[in-house]
Image (cartoon, grey):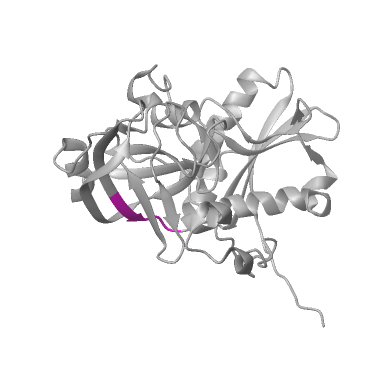
């Protein structure tokens, strides 16, 4: 089973469950309420960085900025000879890392898929009763994770130097993360073409971004100026393939069945570029459109 999540986007355990089990959602209780859970050949990992978990387990999970490495600890009494870690270390299992730095936040930011660099058994840690036990420590690389984890939650980083970086600067043609593209569109909504006909929908006075559906969170939910039509917007930082069509149709179906009432529901895919398969698929999906984005910046003396 191949699981698709968006780097930098936030997911609750329930959201992740819907991605893993589209027809029924996550099972109640069990490993889904712990630090990690296995879903076929995937390992879903929930990390707390800089804060203890809600069960009072407190691990020194952290991102080492200078090495670009995530240091992660297994559950108490975990070790490399257990079947889960044997499959993880051998590459038979794909580890998906989700992290939060506020244990009161029910959502975790998706960091990406990790690649194990090294591991160590017998590392001391505290269990939920504050008793010292041993566990396994793994060092992993997760591409772009340093762009997602806030600077203040990283170790071995010159925070003063990094705080001078302008977060609004983006590459000329593409975005590092889809989350960056989402943030850019939201910040600049008043100045883009979509603003002529649509507003970002609000619920409880909150913008409907990363809007929760039964298939996971959609990127942006907009509504027409006349309030007669919803627009589901799906973002891809690079090239979009026909795989995205099924994804956006599931989101649109959720909106139609749970929110729209008598309103129309349309879809919009925004990406740097498309491919022939997507163009062919869209030719028989008239309620979904595709738009390319271009972003540039200039220096003024």
Q: Residue furthest bottom?
A: 301
Residue at 38 percent across and 25 percent down: it is 32
Position above or below: 195 against 252 = below
| Identity of the residue drawn at 37% across and 38% down | 45
Tell me where residue 101 appears, x and y as whole percent. Answer: 53, 42
Answer with left or right where residue 96 lies relative to residue 186.
Answer: left
For the N terminus, the quadrant is top left
Instruction: Assess whether residue 10 is covered by the magenta stretch.
Output: no
The magenta span reads 138-143
Could you say which is closer to the camera, residue 144 or residue 242?
144
Q: Is residue 189 above or below residue 220?
A: below
Percent position (x, y) of residue 83? 16, 36
Q: Residue at x 33, y 55 (%)?
A: 140
* Residue 91 seen in this snapshot: no
In magenta segment, residue 139: yes
Q: Residue furthest front?
A: 131
How many circles with numbers are drawn on the protein? 0
Helix, strand or loop: magenta stretch: strand
Is 24 drawn above or below residue 265 in the view shown?
above
Question: Residue 199 appears at what percent x and percent y?
Answer: 80, 39
- Residue 31 horizontal side relative to residue 63, left or right: left
Is 94 positioned to the left or the right of 207 in the image?
left
Residue drawn at x 59%, y 50% is 179
């Amino acid at each position: 089973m191949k699981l698709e999540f968006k780097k930098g986007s936030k997911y609750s355990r329930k959201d992740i469950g819907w991605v893993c089990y589209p027809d029924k959602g996550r099972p109640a209780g069990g490993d889904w309420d712990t630090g990690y859970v296995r879903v076929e050949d995937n390992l879903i990992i929930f990390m707390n960085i800089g804060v203890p978990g809600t069960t009072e387990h407190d691990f020194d999970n952290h991102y080492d900025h200078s090495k670009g490495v995530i240091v992660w600890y297994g559950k108490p009494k975990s070790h490399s000879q257990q079947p889960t870690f044997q499959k993880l270390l051998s590459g038979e299992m794909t580890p998906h890392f989700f992290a939060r730095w506020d244990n009161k936040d029910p959502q975790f930011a998706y960091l990406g898929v990790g690649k194990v660099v090294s591991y160590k058994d017998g590392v001391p840690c505290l269990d939920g009763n504050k008793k010292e036990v041993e566990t396994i420590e793994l060092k992993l690389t997760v591409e772009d994770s340093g762009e997602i984890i806030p600077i203040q939650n990283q170790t071995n980083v010159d925070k003063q130097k990094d705080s001078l970086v302008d977060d609004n600067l983006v590459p000329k043609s593409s975005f590092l993360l889809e989350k960056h593209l989402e943030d850019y569109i939201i910040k600049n909504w008043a100045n883009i073409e979509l603003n002529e006909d649509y507003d970002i929908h609000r619920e409880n006075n909150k913008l409907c971004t990363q809007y929760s559906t039964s298939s996971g969170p959609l990127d942006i939910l907009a509504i027409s100026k006349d309030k007669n039509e919803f627009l589901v917007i799906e973002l891809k930082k690079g090239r979009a393939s026909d795989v995205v069509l099924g994804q956006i149709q599931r989101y649109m179906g959720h909106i139609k069945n749970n929110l729209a009432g008598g309103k129309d529901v349309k879809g919009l895919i925004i990406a740097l570029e498309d491919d022939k398969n997507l163009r062919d698929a869209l030719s028989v999906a008239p309620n979904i459109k595709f738009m390319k984005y271009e972003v540039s910046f200039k220096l003024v003396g």
